[in-house]
Amino acid sequence: MDVSVYIAGLSMGLSLIIAIGAQNAFLLRQGLRGQHVFAVCLACALSDAILIGVGVAGFGTAAAWLPWLDPVMRYAGAAFLAWYGAKSLWSAWRSTGALTVGPQAEGPGPVKTLLACLAITWLNPHVYLDTVVLLGTISTQFDGFQASFAAGAITGSFLFFFSLGYGATKLRPIFARPAAWRLLEGVIALVMWAIAVRLVTGG
């Protein structure tokens, strides 16, 4: 284990996932609701770990071998994000209550929540670009220490996702007001749609 390479992987991994995106918006929403937070954080982190491992292992050229993969993932991801954005906007439009904290809070069960989380993660081609292609390419600069780089990047994913998921609970007093919750749902809808448009247009 090379500490300097590990730190390089950690910083690079964090820099790629810290931006607001569909996955982060979904996790933030679950954290605020306090529903299935650990499972969603773990699903996001493990998904990243798998993709980083694949990229560092040398499969960053998979898209070149399978030219049909990019458009299929792009349009499937855009369709899902458009649907999820519409769902969030509908929730913002019809919601009249504040954020409910505690066992009485309503929401999808763990299976549906995890399926939505995995769909948002694995149907987003940008996830593959960041983890498999970009991190996989950067890791080649550390010949012989790719494992240290991957370990750092994976650590960054676990730190970020669990910090976001559980840190969101600190914002619950703000979202105890109905207007704040509706605003968050509206912002999530816009984020989902913006990403969907970028996927379709190739931006």
Image: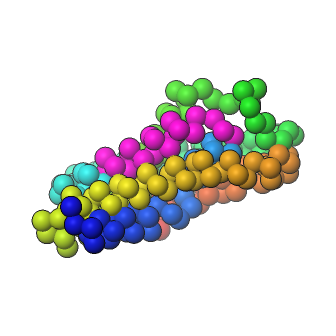
In the figure, is residue 22 to the left or right of 187? Answer: left
State the residue at coordinates (44%, 40%).
43
Residue 6 visible in rendering = yes
Compared with residue 114, is residue 84 higher up or lower down, i.e. above or below? Answer: below
In the figure, is residue 134 to the left or right of 58? Answer: right
In the figure, is residue 195 to the left or right of 71? Answer: right
Color style of the picture: rainbow
Q: Quadrant of residue 9?
A: bottom left
State the residue at coordinates (54%, 58%).
21
Question: Considering depth in this image, is 126 or 39 the residue closer to the camera?
Answer: 39
As drawn, which residue projects farthest toward the left? 144
Q: Quadrant of residue 126?
A: bottom left
Residue 13 at what x, y percent from top left? 39, 63
Question: Considering depth in this image, is 110 or 193 the residue closer to the camera?
Answer: 110
In the figure, is residue 24 to the left or right of 55? Answer: right
Identify the main secondary structure in magenta: helix
Quadrant containing the N terminus is bottom left
Residue 153 at what x, y percent from top left? 34, 60
Residue 197 visible in rendering = no
Residue 190 at what x, y percent from top left? 66, 57
Q: Which residues are magenta?
A: 33-51
Residue 194 at what x, y percent from top left? 59, 60
- The number of callouts visible is 0
Is 22 in the magenta?
no
State the residue at coordinates (17%, 65%).
145
State the residue at coordinates (75%, 41%).
91
Is 47 in the magenta?
yes
